[in-house]
Image (tube, grey):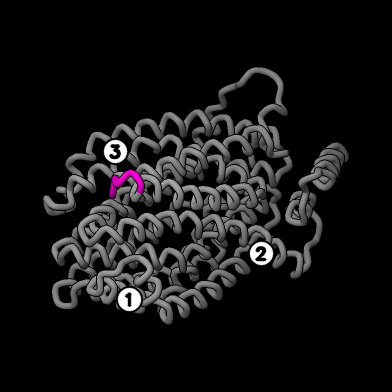
Amino acid sequence: MTGRRYVISRNIHYLCTLKMARKSDILLAYIREGKAMTTTDKLSLIGLLSVPSILAQMTSVLMYYIDAMMVGRLGTGPSASIGLMESSTWLFASMTGAASMGFSVQAAHFVGANDFRKARDVFRHGLICTFILSVLIAVAGLAIAGRLPYWLRAGADIAPDASVYFAIFMWVIPFYQLANLCGAMLKSSGDMRVPSATSILMCTLDVLFNYIFIYQCHLGVRGAAYGTAAAIIVAAVLQAYFAIFRNPILALRQDRGPFVWVPAYLRQALKIASPIALQSFLMSGAQIISTRIVAPLGNACIAAHSFAITAESLCYMPGHGIGDAATTLVGQCTGARRRDLCRNFAVMTVMTGMVVMALMGALMYVFAPEMIGFLTPVEEIRQLGVQSLRIEAFAEPFFAAAIVTYSVCVGAGDTLRPTLINLGSMWCVRLTLAAFLARDYGLAGVWTAMAIELTFRGTLFLVRLFRGKWMKMEKAD
């Protein structure tokens, strides 16, 4: 025990004396050291971790927002072509996120247990495994790119552009995976600043590249895809540099000796990531089915549906940012085996998320005309989009409950039951209601089904949160 205390003391001293150390590093060190934390400390740490992550989440959505806005100026057809493929790109991109979580959650547990060497070993395994996976994902996406728009019931007028947009995105999936993994690893170590700054830079570059490719080179939808791809590549390289070479916990140069393959890390990654991947696949698949429900309503409805989803994303991204903080905090508390602190952070992050997203929902209701109007000058699309956003605004607090509680469960390594909640709610409630209501109420019916389902799902997650069965205090191996 004396030796362990010495190691903990040495690691805490090292973190606190680093030139780049900040208050969040010191407070995170309290978790690993076993120190008591006041309510002010906990709230401060939630805020310090959440704000950079919220900025990162919102800027990533802004990238889609900017694509939609710039292409929206070209007319209904180009807007519909990108909107048609949005759910499909999310499907493939979400698979990279699931793979990243399989390794980053393990890293968070090891960091919480003050075993930084094992955290780096997990990182090495993640770099190898996710690269192989991303190549396979890219190949699969490219193989179906030509046929996918027609499977989604697109018209011949928008299918070629939609196919090109999707194919270009697939070419950069390995870079997207690299950025995703390195960002998740940095967050697991408590560094939310670098992923946030990189996301802001990516958004800025996306604006610049889109302007060049869409308007200067006159490439239209293809130009939007090129701009996004170039921004992703730059962001991936930067995040990899900071994670692999600069982070004081993760930098791989700190270790000496040959790389040793540890099958247990891959098995644990599969255990954590498999439910997440299944959820990502089926949830995104449900979004694709939703797109098929909307597609027969016409190009204006397709475009309005896509624009409303993009605009709403700006409102629920704070929930994902707070969720990132929850995953880091619960993951490190789990590694440190601090059950009471784990529960406290879980409840506090969920309540914070609900309050923030309730406020965002109110703002979305009031400013819905401006949010949609910024994306398109077409009046029919604007009216449909505004109607959709105002229906959805009432469900935002419960959406926050679902997002943040799910993130809490992931941080604890509990992924199977939360996945079943998400999938059951989406497939049994949302899609069933959407298919039924769309016949009589059109796009408004689809969004009403969405609001009802999110309220139902959020309620189920709150029940799971307060029952506490998600907490797992297993020893990090």
Callout 1 crowding tier (Cα within 10 Å): few <14, some 14–19, many ≥20:
many
Q: Earlier in the sequence, mark 1 or mark 2?
A: 2
Task: List the residue tagged with mark 2.
Answer: 47
Quarter holding the C terminus is: top right
Left or right, 216 with reference to 14? left
Q: Mark 1: which secondary structure? A: helix
Q: Position of residue 456 (x, y in %)?
A: 38, 72
132, 211: nearer the viewer: 211
x and y, in percent, of residue 24 in the image:
73, 55
- Kindly report the distance in space between the C-alpha atoms of the residues bearing marks 3 and 2: 38 Å
Residue at (17% x, 48% y) in the render: 159
Question: Is disc 1 in contact with disc 3, using a CB cutoff of under 8 Å?
Answer: no
Residue under circle 1?
386
Q: For the N terminus, which image quadrant?
A: top right
Name the foreground residue: 40 vs 50.
50
Q: Which mark is residue 72?
A: none
Q: Which residues are magenta?
A: 216-221
Q: Residues within 10 Å of mark 3 (few under 14, many from 20)?
A: many
| Residue at 64%, 55% in the rendered image | 329
* Three-letter residue code for mark 3: Gly
- Which badge, 3 or 2, comes first in the chain's sequence? 2
Look at label 1 and name its amino acid: Val
Mark 1 vs mark 3, foreground winner is: 1
